[in-house]
Image: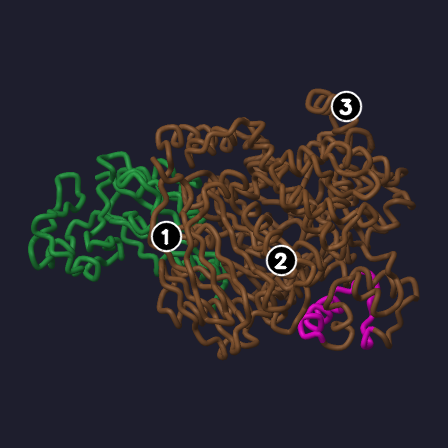
């Protein structure tokens, strides 16, 4: 399956992905409306985008109390706006912190832009790639710990 | 679209004496006449701050402003200006930084935030979209920039809050303390952190969840795509990605204008040891970028060996790298990284710090300063450890550090010696390019509205040393020859207007100006697509001229005249004796004549003529300056 993968050391934390995502989906520039969210840790020079990993078994889907979330054939997660109550259980259920709610409690979840993710297309450093890949399971915490070990940073 | 695109549309005014916050709508005619950022700040500074205002008194305004491109996907649009009357120079104070603070301001809903008054107890402000909260900052007293950022984010329970912080140097009254965003994005020229601390304000913390829309999305997208492609294909792309501005150091050395041992030479024999190339090869581990940047040029470094092992951080940029090495004669790169890190944490302007230290070193070497006066410090050229000690002492205003803590000009006046050896203009300490090797840059320093600094003009075309460019652009081949004097008035007027527009729109000057991308004709298209405002390229340039002239009017009202547009004596009288910039001096007066003529300013006084100001629609300034003479 084609997936978005990230190489943490390449992510410069410019947040162009957030802008491309919100503009592509909502027609305006707003990180709060983006399906991808960059976490920055300035002290250690670390940056990492949080986004949907298309997990085979998706806890937000299985734990949604109203059954509003479902897996599509492309491996993304769809939200049925009619049945979603905006309770936010999906936000806490996701292992990769990939879901957030907008101001009207609508869950914002990556739909791969229909097969050509804007975030990947616009990433200036090619930290994000969209390619055939096994499940990509590195968490932000894993990546940060890995880089800090490589760099001999221990605080 | 009836509203302007690009702008957030609101201005936030916070009065700390009254503990009151007010939001007002952005005035569209202000947007049309001054565009944003530095333009907004300079206009308000002229209108609301005058000769009676004490820079460290409650009446001074501390203004944060950003531009209409910020918050959008326009490449590199991330910057903001902080302005006030400067406690270091007594004239216009202004500084600019990138990072992720300005975009957060926009998403919170503001184009400009204006701080006034003085808080009775230490506070920091938390701006969360439309809400403004005054929060106790007693626990942040004396905390450095890094600690403060960490504590505030913990207090607020939100790691995505963006902060702009005054460090301990500001609290201790060091006159060249800065405001720091993203820990090391230094808005550090002219003492804006000192002004912030004088208001009892430790930090501004901001979080925004709003959005920015542009007036003509399709046109805007096309322009962004074109500009992005131009950046990716640019000959400077690789070098900037790898080294940022540190790529300059070896070039400056080869051209003989790298200020070395306090401008006694333009060549540093250890340049290879402290170069951007060495930094990239041995220390850099990761690239970082400001908001919306498509050419991230900041670098995260780690020192793994030697006496500074365990040191890590971001940067430095050329000005810090060069001034903490060549300017002071220090050849130990790791020590320069340490000094850079200390200045960031303590919250001080590195150019001023290094000028103060290298000036003191020159006096010491010449026998004009004794070890008794320096608290026992051996200030021989290149004594890096003494430099580290002095940085600490300056930040605490302790002993000899207290003498230096107001800048080099003030230090010379306190000691009663060495004034003509201070490398400053109007009290602002100079940057890392010797004007004897770059005559246009030199003229830029002499007339810059914030004092001795290159970022008001930065006529990079001189570096090409190609007369054909000068001929084509200004009708004067010498205009773009770095060692020639002719045509520099035209060159500097042009570049000042251009930079003022960039500082108003707030993308990155390194990219949009130095890489020759956002020229007036393209800026005209970008402004229309983003905001909906139609301006011809000539009208865009007029906005730049309007900003330059309102700033000049402010400084004239504070007493500045032609006599103050002057470089230090050494540059005017003593040629460099070695290297590719040797043999000439800075011939100031003819260049000033040409510049004032180009500007429409009085040749004798340097005051803008009434008709010049009226032609730019600056009628209040025209009548006020008409009365001055």
**x%, y% of residue B561?**
79, 48
Marks 1 & 2, CB-CB < 8 Å contact: no
Which tint is chain B?
A: brown
Q: At x 42% / y 30%, what residue is drawn?
A: B225
The answer to which of A152 and B174 lies nearer the viewer is B174
Q: Position of residue B482 (x, y in %)?
A: 78, 33
B598 left or right, relative to B209: right
Do the residues at pointers 1 and 2 share their chain?
A: no
In the image, B400: left or right of B235?
A: right
Q: Which mark is residue B476?
A: 3
As measured in the structure, the alpha-carbon distance from the residue carrying label 3 to the one carrying label 2 is 40 Å
Residue ID for mark 1: A38
Provide the residue designation for mark 2: B49
SS type, badge 3: loop
Tell me if residue B267 can be seen: no
- Residue B394 lies in magenta, yes or no? yes
Tell me the element at label 1. strand
User: Dividing the picture into quarters, in which one does residue B209 lie?
Assistant: bottom left
Tell me which residue sits at (57%, 38%) in the image. Answer: B501
* Closer-to-camera residue (B439/B589): B589
Residue B229 in magenta? no
Do marks 3 and 1 share a subunit?
A: no
Per the rendered image, the range of residues in magenta is B374-397
Residue drawn 48% across the image and 71% down it: B18
Q: Secondary structure at mark 2?
A: loop
Pointer 3 and pointer 2 on the same chain: yes
B478 versus B627 height, above or below? above
Chain identifier for the green-coloured part of the image: A
**What subunit carries mark 1?**
A
**Do we see residue A143 in this rendering?**
yes
């Amino acid at each position: 399956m084609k997936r978005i993968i990230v190489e943490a050391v390449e992510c410069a934390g410019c947040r162009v992905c957030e802008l491309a995502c919100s503009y592509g989906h909502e027609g305006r520039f707003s990180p709060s409306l983006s399906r991808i969210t960059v976490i920055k840790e300035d002290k250690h020079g670390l940056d990492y985008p949080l986004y949907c990993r298309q997990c085979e078994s998706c806890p937000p889907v299985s734990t949604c109390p109203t059954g509003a979330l479902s897996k599509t054939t492309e491996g993304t997660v769809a939200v049925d706006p009619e049945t979603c109550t905006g309770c936010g259980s999906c936000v806490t259920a996701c292992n990769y912190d990939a879901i957030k709610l907008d101001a009207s409690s609508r869950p914002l979840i990556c739909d791969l832009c229909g097969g050509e993710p804007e975030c990947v297309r616009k990433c200036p450093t090619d930290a994000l790639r969209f390619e055939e890949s096994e499940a990509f399971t590195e968490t932000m915490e894993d990546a940060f710990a890995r880089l800090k070990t490589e760099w001999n940073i221990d605080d | 679209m009836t509203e302007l695109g690009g702008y957030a549309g609101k201005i936030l005014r916070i009065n700390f004496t009254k503990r009151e916050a007010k939001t007002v709508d952005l005035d569209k005619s202000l947007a049309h006449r001054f565009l944003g950022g530095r333009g907004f700040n300079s206009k308000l500074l002229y209108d609301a701050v005058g000769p009676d205002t004490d820079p460290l008194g409650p009446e001074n305004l501390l203004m944060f402003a950003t531009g209409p491109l910020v918050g959008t996907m326009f490449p590199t649009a991330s910057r903001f200006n902080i302005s006030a009357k400067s406690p270091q120079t007594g004239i216009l104070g202004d500084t600019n930084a990138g990072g992720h603070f300005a975009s957060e301001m926009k998403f919170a809903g503001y184009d400009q935030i204006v701080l006034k008054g003085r808080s009775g107890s230490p506070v920091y402000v938390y701006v969360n979209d439309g809400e403004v909260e005054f929060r106790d900052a007693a626990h942040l007293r004396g905390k450095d920039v890094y600690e403060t950022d960490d504590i505030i984010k913990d207090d607020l329970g939100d790691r995505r809050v963006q902060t702009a912080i005054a460090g301990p140097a500001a609290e201790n009254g060091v006159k060249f303390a800065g405001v720091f965003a993203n820990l090391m994005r230094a808005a550090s020229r002219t003492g804006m952190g000192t002004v912030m601390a004088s208001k009892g304000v430790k930090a501004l913390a901001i979080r925004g969840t709003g959005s920015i829309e542009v007036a003509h999305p399709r046109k805007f997208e096309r322009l962004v795509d074109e500009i992005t492609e131009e950046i990716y294909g640019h000959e400077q792309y690789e070098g900037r990605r790898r080294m940022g501005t540190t790529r300059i150091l070896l070039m400056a050395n080869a051209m003989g204008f790298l200020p070395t041992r306090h401008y006694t030479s333009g060549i540093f024999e250890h340049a290879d040891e402290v170069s951007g190339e060495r930094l990239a090869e041995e220390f850099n581990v990761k690239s970082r970028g400001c908001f919306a940047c498509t050419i991230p040029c900041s670098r995260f470094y780690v020192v793994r060996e030697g006496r500074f092992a365990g040191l890590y951080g971001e940067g430095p940029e050329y000005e810090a790298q060069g001034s903490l090495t060549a300017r002071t004669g220090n050849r130990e790169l790791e020590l320069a990284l340490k000094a850079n890190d200390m200045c960031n944490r303590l919250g001080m302007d590195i150019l001023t710090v290094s000028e103060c230290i290298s000036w003191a070193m020159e006096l010491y070497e010449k026998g004009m300063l004794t070890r008794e006066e320096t608290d026992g410090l051996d200030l021989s050229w290149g004594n890096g450890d003494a430099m580290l000690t002095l940085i600490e002492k300056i930040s605490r205003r302790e002993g000899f550090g207290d003498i230096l803590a107001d800048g080099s000009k003030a230090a010379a006046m306190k000691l009663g010696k060495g004034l003509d050896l201070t490398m400053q203009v109007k009290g602002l300490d100079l940057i890392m390019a010797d004007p004897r090797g770059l005559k246009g840059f030199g003229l830029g320093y002499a007339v810059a509205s914030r004092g001795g600094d290159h970022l008001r003009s930065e006529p990079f075309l001189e570096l090409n040393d190609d007369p054909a460019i000068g001929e084509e652009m200004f009708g004067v081949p010498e205009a773009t020859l770095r060692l020639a004097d002719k045509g520099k008035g035209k060159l500097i007027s042009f570049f000042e207007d251009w930079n003022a527009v960039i500082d108003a729109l707030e993308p990155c000057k390194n990219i949009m100006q130095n890489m020759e991308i956002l020229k007036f004709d393209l800026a005209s298209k970008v402004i229309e697509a983003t905001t909906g405002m139609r301006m011809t390229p000539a009208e865009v340039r007029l906005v730049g001229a309007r900003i330059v002239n309102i700033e000049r009017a402010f400084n004239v009202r504070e007493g500045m005249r032609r006599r103050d547009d002057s470089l230090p004596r050494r540059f005017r009288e003593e040629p460099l004796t070695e290297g590719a910039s040797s043999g000439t001096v800075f011939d100031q007066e003819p260049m000033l004549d040409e510049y004032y003529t180009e500007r429409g300013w009085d040749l004798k006084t340097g005051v803008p003529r009434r008709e010049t100001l009226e032609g730019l629609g600056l009628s209040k300034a025209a009548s006020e300056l008409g009365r001055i003479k």
